[in-house]
Amino acid sequence: MAEPIEFWFDFSSPYSYLASERIDELAAKYGRKVKWRAVMIAAAFKVSGLPFLLTVPLKGEYSKRDIERSARFLGLPYAFPSRFPVATLAAARGYYWLHGQDCGKAREFAHAVFRAYWVDDRDIGELPVVLEIADQLGIDRDAFTAAIATPEIKDRLRQETDAAIARGMFGVPYIMVDGEPFWGADRLPQIDKWLATGGF
Amino acid sequence: MAEPIEFWFDFSSPYSYLASERIDELAAKYGRKVKWRAVMIAAAFKVSGLPFLLTVPLKGEYSKRDIERSARFLGLPYAFPSRFPVATLAAARGYYWLHGQDCGKAREFAHAVFRAYWVDDRDIGELPVVLEIADQLGIDRDAFTAAIATPEIKDRLRQETDAAIARGMFGVPYIMVDGEPFWGADRLPQIDKWLATGGF
């Protein structure tokens, strides 16, 4: 059986949100699964020296417009949040803790976090908001709060981020298909062709 | 009649080359014309503070791969040149001089310069190479050489670059369709939909 497609994301990345809404169905078309991997993209920016996109003169303004248009192009709801960027450590750590218990629940949680931030303008940088999202999915708030404070979970997020950088990740969404890296929600059509043809 | 689509490019930009091979036919599908505008992209980088893409750690390596794959995806010949980047002043100035005489010839020249660099590995940073390209299109070498040394033509390239930056250009290809800016050869599908629907 083919290896799963790997999908690296940061909850604070709008293009990651766009890809998160399409990657599973795209993979399923070819009978493939997707491994979701939360990362702290700021760590990659330290390696590349790249600035946060939305703070770059000219490019930042364009990007806000491009993200909105890309969401409409993909038929996805989207609204730029009132607070940006936000720290997504709690959500990302919670994702890995959940993943250790129940993959399906972790995926549900990830979707809910993305949508809370990129559709419903909820501040996912605040722990109470993250706990509310968890609660709505039937996840125990106290267990969640305790888990994300453990050294194991903190290390996990760091290790996953470092491992992604070692695989070439410099931005998100970063998607690896059978050894071929793709960066950006706008590469979904190339991924589709790659999966259809086995590489081109 | 609708205004022409505007297409800003730098001959040293691989994604500009990719777009240059598709933009006219895409516009023609909707009965639209394209205005080609050469710029010096380094001037925009001074405003945005952005580095040259291919020199960025991690992202540079990815991009080389992405450009090759994107060329295959679009069905275009492509080979990374042995010398990169190169100064494209002579070619860009020559483009404007030709444009003042004969639009069609200027377009032919632009295609020939792009292909010389991005397909045939000819060093378009060298004036003799640019003159050879011009000569093959029946353009007078001496007139070309004299024209690109005039203050008028030098100013024209500077003014076009400044005007593009004033319109938000921070990278190339930069394409404006009825007031909507699109950056990157990967936005051609969005441009297609924009032209088909009158905006979405």
Image: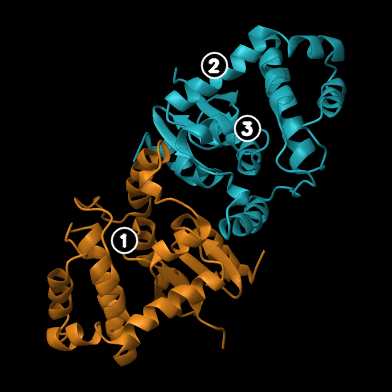
Chain colours: A orange, B cyan
Q: Taking the image as drawn, is residue B108 in sight?
A: no
Q: Residue at x 63, y 50 (%)?
A: B74
Could you tell me which secondary element the residue under label 2 belongs to?
Answer: helix
Is residue A71 positioned above or below B196 on the image?
Answer: below
**Horizontal and vertical percent position of residue B104:** 69, 19
Amino acid bearing label 1: Ser
Q: Residue at x 81, y 36 (%)?
A: B123
Could you tell me which secondary element the residue under label 1 belongs to?
Answer: loop
Is residue A71 positioned above or below A109 on the image?
Answer: above
Q: Report, in whole angstroms, how far the alpha carbon at label 1 lies from the one at label 2.
A: 38 Å
**Horizontal and vertical percent position of residue A37:** 41, 75
Rendered image: mark on residue A12: 1
Q: Report, in whole angstroms, how far the alpha carbon at label 2 lies from the one at label 3.
A: 14 Å
Q: Chain of mark 2?
A: B
Q: Which residue is mark 3?
A: B10
Within 10 angstroms of label 1, few (less than 14), some, or many (20 or more) residues?
many
Q: Taking the image as drawn, is residue B174 in sight?
A: yes
Within 10 angstroms of label 3, few (less than 14), some, or many (20 or more) residues?
many
Q: Residue at x 59, y 66 (%)?
A: A194
Say which quadrant the N terminus of chain B sits in. top left
**Horizontal and vertical percent position of residue B112:** 76, 31
Could you tell me which secondary element the residue under label 3 belongs to?
Answer: loop
